[in-house]
Image (cartoon, rainbow, N blue to C red):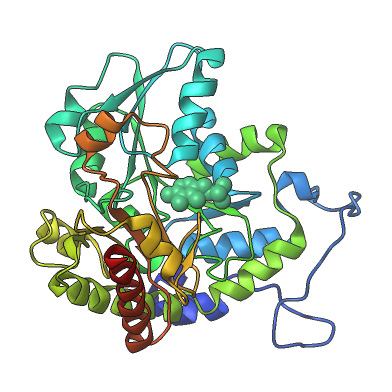
Amino acid sequence: MAKSEKLGVNTICTHVGEVKDEQFKGAISPLFMSSSYAYENVDVKRYPRYFNTPNQEALGKKIAALEHTEAGMIFGSGMAAVSHCLLAFLQKGDHIVLPKTLYGGTYNFIVEEFGKFGIEYTFANGFKEENFREALQKNTKVIYVETPSNPLMLITDLGMIAKLAKEHNLVSMIDNTFASPINQNPANFGIDIMIHSATKYMGGHSDICAGAVAASKEHMLRIWNLSKNMGGSLSDYTVWLLERSLKTMALRVKAQNRNAKKMAKWLQKHPLVNKVHYPGLKDHPDYQLAKKQMKGYSGMLSFELVSSVDANAFMQALQLIKQSMSLAGVESTILSPAKTSHSLLTAEERTHQGISDGLLRFSVGIEEKKDLIADIEQAFKVVAKEELV
Ligand SMILES: *Cc1c(COP(=O)(O)O)cnc(C)c1O
């Protein structure tokens, strides 16, 4: 167990994994942009693509401490992190089990690329133990989950997944992007590998594209062995920016948790809203499970407008809340899953998954609740007026 585990989360965010400024004693990590380092008389051959420049190495330690694991690595994007983790543990003839509702990029990577590598996959038909169990095969090597799920925020039992993995000698992986390490530490429940799109809550300001992985030293060595050949490292400048962003991650995410819960409760009472999906609401189907394994319920929620309101016109009328493909920035954003992330599914598939045309995914930022409410109210008024014309 790392010593840093005894530190509070804000202290980890601020202090763990810094590059010490020995020369000038500056307060923050200096940025080392060298792509060339001396190799004589040094144990480690440093090179950006080896993921071991001073800034990469230090940030890896912060990621490890945040996820309660031994090791951490930073990648050029969330998808670089996802693809490198999967390919590090799967080879020709192997099989993986994943949930059906996956992040679009991960889904595309699997269906478009796995055939070339001769890797088999099964999408579990739900989030319960029996759904994952019945998808297992003799050649299954990895079990992979995303919880909360996108966009309905359904919860998978992390302890159940870890147990299933141990029982069948599988490596368990989670895409922990939606929760962030502030709200969920899957290693505490026995999950082996935590993957993040650091483009989201870790970056938090919608100005960085990066990925992060946390795992044991042994698992990380296996990932590193592949990654140094694939070449998906992140520029040191962005590594440095990400370290800066992480200093305020706990503050940001906790504010977003609070805001999302308030907005979920407010939306739930609104006559033009049919349904709100937020795991922090007592009537969410997975509330008890979320309470057991999450420390906060995140800033992500989705809500369904009543069928008389045109979802697209409503989004266009919003002034403060921006339409955006991405999520988790300090600014509130909204998108239509039916028109974006889930547009490749057939209408029947979407209905089957509970994704109607009126469903909107809301990434709640740090603005004051009253301003978010005022924006939504004025947008409803605009849409209602259009209906009368
Ligand atoms: C955005 C995202 C990814 C991919 O990350 P990129 O940084 O865009 O490559 C993976 N998983 C989830 C859940 C995401 O939201």
Q: Position of residue 36 (x, y in %)?
A: 90, 52
- Between 123 and 388, the residue placed more toward the observer is 388
Please name the residue shown 15% across and 67% down the image. Answer: 281
Please name the residue shown 12% across and 59% down the image. Answer: 284
Q: Quadrant of the N terminus?
A: bottom left
Q: Position of residue 258 (x, y in %)?
A: 29, 79
Please name the residue shown 47% across and 75% down the image. Answer: 319
**Is the residue 42 above or below the residue 164 in the image?**
below
How many labels were placed on the picture?
A: 0
- Between 90 and 204, the residue placed more toward the observer is 204
One can see residue 195 in this view: no
Q: Is 261 left or right of 109, judged from the image as shown?
A: left
Q: Position of residue 96 (x, y in %)?
A: 37, 25
Q: Position of residue 69 (x, y in %)?
A: 43, 56
Please name the residue shown 80% across and 47% down the image. Answer: 45
- Between 59 and 253, the residue placed more toward the observer is 253
Q: Is 106 left or right of 299, judged from the image as shown?
A: right
**Is the residue 229 above or below the residue 376 in the image?**
above
